[in-house]
Image (tube, rainbow, N blue to C red):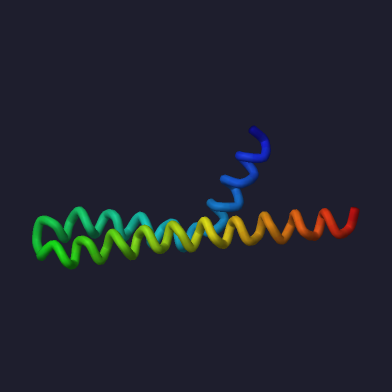
């Protein structure tokens, strides 16, 4: 459980990307009421992309730390 909480902390350290993803999802809900479906789908795709970038950066940091640990030991 401790490893998972450390991983969540690493993901949350990229709060800028996560915030952009949440804003994209919120905008997709608001846009659906006013504009067409293409804008709504665009906001959802951007939000998913932001979440993927945050996850990728967190995984890259974890792999880099693991690599340094294995090389030093």
Residue 20: percent from the left, percent from the top?
A: 39, 62
| Residue occupying image coordinates x 83% and y 54% | 70
Q: Residue at x 22, y 58 (%)?
A: 28
In the picture provided, is 45 more to the left or to the right than 41? right
Where does the image place residue 43, in percent across and percent down from the top left?
Answer: 27, 63
State which quadrant residue 49 falls in.
bottom left
Give the side of residue 12 with respect to residue 51, left or right.
Answer: right
Question: Position of 44 compared to 1: left or right?
Answer: left
Tell me the quadrant of the picture where the N terminus can be found. Answer: top right
Q: Residue furthest right?
A: 73
The tally of labels here is: 0
Dividing the picture into quarters, in which one does residue 25 lie?
Answer: bottom left
Asked which quadrant contains residue 18, the reply is bottom left
x and y percentages locating residue 42 in the rendered image: 25, 66
Residue positioned 33% across, 65% down in the render:
46
């Amino acid at each position: 459980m401790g490893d998972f909480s450390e991983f969540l902390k690493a993901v949350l350290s990229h709060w800028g990307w996560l915030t952009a993803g949440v804003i994209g999802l919120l905008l997709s809900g608001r846009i659906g009421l006013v504009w067409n479906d293409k804008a709504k789908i665009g906001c959802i795709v951007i939000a998913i992309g932001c979440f993927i970038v945050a996850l990728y950066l967190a995984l890259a940091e974890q792999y880099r730390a693991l690599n340094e640990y294995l090389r030093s030991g």
